[in-house]
Amino acid sequence: MITWVNKATNEEELVLLLKSRDRRGFEILYDRYSAALYGVIVKVLQSDEQAPDVLQESFVKIWKNIDAYDPKKGKLFTWILNIARNTAIDKTRSRSFQSNYQTQSIETSDPEGARSEQMPIEHIGLTDIVNSLKTELREVVDIIYFRGYTHAEAAESLNLPLGTVKTRIKIAIRELRKLIGK
Amino acid sequence: MDIKDYISSGIIENYVLGATSSEENAELERLADMYPEIRQEIEASKFALTEYIFQFQLDPPADLKGRIMRKLSDLDMPISSQNSPERSDLKVYKSQNRDLWRTFGIAASILLLVSGLANWFQFQNTQALHQELSVLEAENNRIQNQLQVAQADYRSSLNDLQLLNNPEFDRVELYGSDDFPNSRVSILWNPHSSSVYLQVLNLPKPPPGKQYQLWSVYEGDVKDAGVFEMSSNGFALHRMKETDKAEQFIITLEKMGGVPKAEGKAYALGKV
């Protein structure tokens, strides 16, 4: 019997619990990361209306695919973050979502108008890190990470040359590394 | 390759954002395994991005955890024993069972229908066979009768043939009188047995109420030898009255049934 399960369980132990489909492992995962995942989902969907469903769907995918997670390839959080993000992005590309959010959809029929609009102002309290990042850098990171745009799509949407997009991405990440002190 | 140039190209930053192609990803993974500096850059960039993303964290609705955990428990049912996995299996079993009974029911219905149809066809068939049998029986009877008639005719003909070829019989040809020159009748007479047979070769058809009668003449004495019908079956041999003595045979047309003494005209006559 596993007796060491608690809030202090390290990532290695947590992965073992998850891979054995232990309910306690998923409770720990939820307690630790649900807010981060939920925040990303809301940011991708630009709404919290369907966010609970997407979070549940993400946990189901984690449950079903946990065997495919290889700790050597990356951290657990990075892996589940990608699942939640991709699930949310898939949702925005689904027909039902687009019919509900036609005007905000990334697949709108008017790319110049809708795509070039600024990311909506966050409805959550922004921290220093986010506020410290220049808007021109944030918008590139956000549109690629939270909306799943390719470089080309981001360039078109932001009305920037492709090279500028790549450069701004590089600068943005380096700024973030400075901001968090690494 | 210059690691510093590669690092400063910005591909690592794009990689952690998930904005690189699968080919670029593969190359980067390969280089990261070869060069610890690259691995370090990747991890540092990922960490920075993750920190940034963490800034947007938002508490989900309070009841969501319970909902998701129940959902995961449902997924767990097939493997774990804590959530009565048999239930769904039982449903499947029952469902299969129901399907089985329904299949049996359909099969039984089809068999009953087929059986009923078979009976009906059998009945119809039997009826038809009965009718056919009746027809065949009637036909058989008819053929039997025909055969009996034919056999009688054959025996009669055979008998006639034997008579005609019997050397004991004398053949007497009767020819027409001056009034009826075309008449022709043959008489077969056996003087030893007194048997007399008559065969009409040609005689006028007698009028209604009249009948031909045969007479034998011996030493001026005329004796009745009997009447005969003009048979449809031509050339039939008619057995006449026995006659032991005769010099001549005469055929006259008399009233129906014949007369004791000849009254009518002679139609045919011939000498022995």
Image: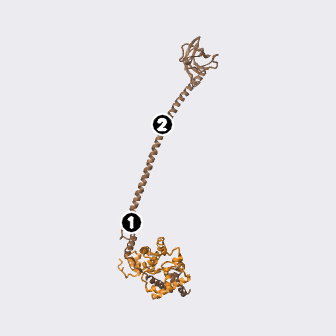
Chain colours: A orange, B brown
Relative placement, left or right, of B170 versus B140 is: right
Chain holding disc 2: B
Q: Are marks 1 and 2 on the same chain?
A: yes
**Amino acid identity at mark 1:** Ser
- The x, y position of residue B184, in whole percent, is 62, 20
- The x, y position of residue B241, in whole percent, is 54, 17
**Which label number is shown at residue B134?**
2
- The alpha-carbon separation of the residues under discs 1 and 2 comes to 68 Å
Considering depth in this image, is B243 or A10 the residue closer to the camera? A10
Judged from this view, the residue extending furthest toward the top is B220
Q: Quadrant of residue A63?
A: bottom left
Query: Residue sitting at 52 percent across and 84 percent down?
Result: A168
Query: Residue sitting at 46 percent across and 41 percent down?
Result: B127
Find numbered disc 2 in the image and state the secondary structure of the residue it sits on. Answer: helix
Considering depth in this image, is A132 or A83 the residue closer to the camera? A132
**Which label number is shown at residue B88?**
1
Residue B66 sits above or below residue B211 on the image: below
**Residue B16 can be seen, yes or no:** no
**Mark 2: few, some, or many residues within 10 Å (few <14, many ≥20)?**
few
Q: Quadrant of residue A59?
A: bottom left
Find numbered disc 1 in the image and state the secondary structure of the residue it sits on. Answer: helix
- The x, y position of residue B230, in whole percent, is 57, 22
Residue B103 sits above or below residue A11 on the image: above
**Amino acid identity at mark 2:** Ser
Residues at marks 1 and 2 touching, judged by CB atoms closer than 8 Å: no
**Mark 1: few, some, or many residues within 10 Å (few <14, many ≥20)?**
few
**Residue B102 can be seen, yes or no:** yes
The quadrant of the rendering that contains the N terminus of chain B is: bottom right
- The x, y position of residue A155, in whole percent, is 54, 80
